[in-house]
């Protein structure tokens, strides 16, 4: 049987969303270019992109629902089912995984009693693994509603989700204070974050991420961060580390068969 048409929003909700949509669409010379922010807008209404939300986007942009669905299902930033107030994403890509991301993800699944892309019974936390958070110099990284929590461990990540579920104040390592996923979606739709101090609370890339820009500007860099094996740093004090990790991190919790430790040169 074919699916019935998506139900419409209540009249007052639709009128409010239409006013917001007109504001978004006016920013673009071609109205269909507004589809991505409009999907964030409807996601801010229900916490995920519903059939009703996709029908709304199609209506106001003069698109087919197939065209809208193709975009909404392509990007993972659009949720397709009900989810929690806080999207907790654990990077499990190569570097974060080696540094402990796999262990963090496994412990959070057990601690929260959910699997990947599942939500806790209280509706507070949706847990998911993320391929890359683009913050490798802070590995392992956890994100909450796209805000960074750097240099995490299984213990710190469990404290983080416990605080989120308990309603305690949670401050990210970098970036604006944490708000709910619906509030985040509205900000991503292009509407101002009206919370006091939120705009000023910017995030910054780590020193290791910026070293290429510094070289391009012709800046003189400090002594080598990593010295050849067996060679002591020159000068009276060790060189400043440009990474947030000043020493190798143990990976045994992530990969018990290959614990961290010094690697011998070939033939030694």
Image: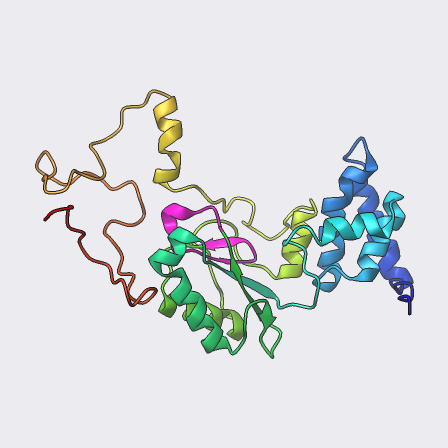
Span shown in magenta:
132-148
Q: Nearer the viewer, residue 58 or 185?
A: 58
Classify 97 as above or below 38: below
The answer to which image quadrant residue 259 occupies is bottom left
Residue at (80, 30) in percent of width and height: 29
Classify 83 as above or below 40: below
The answer to which image quadrant residue 15 occupies is bottom right
Left or right of residue 76, residue 24 in this image: right
Quadrant of the frame with the N terminus: bottom right
Residue at (38, 60) in percent of width and height: 152
Left or right of residue 2, residue 155 in this image: left
Q: Nearer the viewer, residue 230 or 47?
A: 230
Question: Residue 241: image x %, image y %?
Answer: 25, 42
> Residue 136 colored magenta?
yes
Classify 72 as above or below 11: above
Question: Residue 169: image x %, image y %?
Answer: 49, 65
Q: Residue furthest top?
A: 218
Question: Residue 231: image x %, image y %?
Answer: 10, 39
Left or right of residue 182, residue 34 in this image: right
Q: Answer yes or no: is residue 16 visible.
A: no
Residue at (59, 71) in percent of width and height: 118
């Amino acid at each position: 049987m074919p699916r019935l048409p998506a139900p419409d929003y209540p009249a007052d909700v639709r009128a409010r969303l239409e006013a917001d949509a007109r504001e978004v669409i006016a920013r673009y010379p071609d109205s269909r270019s507004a589809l991505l922010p409009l999907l964030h807008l409807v996601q801010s209404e229900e916490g995920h992109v519903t059939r009703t939300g996709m029908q709304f986007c199609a209506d106001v942009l003069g698109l087919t629902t197939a065209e809208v669905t193709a975009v909404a299902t392509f990007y993972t930033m659009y949720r397709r089912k009900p989810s929690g107030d806080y999207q907790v994403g654990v990077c499990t890509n190569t570097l974060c995984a080696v540094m402990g991301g796999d262990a963090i993800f496994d412990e959070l699944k057990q601690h929260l009693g959910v699997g990947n892309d599942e939500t806790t019974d209280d509706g507070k936390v949706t847990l998911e693994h993320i391929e890359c958070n683009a913050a490798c110099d802070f590995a392992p990284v956890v994100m909450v509603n796209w805000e960074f929590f750097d240099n995490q461990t299984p213990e710190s990540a469990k404290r983080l989700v416990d605080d989120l579920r308990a309603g305690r104040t949670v401050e990210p390592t970098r970036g604006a204070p944490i708000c709910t996923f619906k509030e985040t979606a509205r900000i991503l739709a292009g509407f101002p974050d009206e919370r006091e101090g939120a705009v000023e609370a910017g995030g910054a890339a780590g020193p290791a991420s910026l070293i290429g820009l510094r070289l391009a500007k012709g800046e003189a860099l400090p002594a080598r961060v990593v010295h050849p094996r067996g060679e002591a740093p020159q000068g009276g004090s060790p060189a400043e580390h440009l990474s947030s990790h000043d020493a190798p991190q143990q990976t045994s919790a992530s990969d018990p068969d290959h614990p961290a430790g010094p690697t011998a040169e070939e033939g030694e």
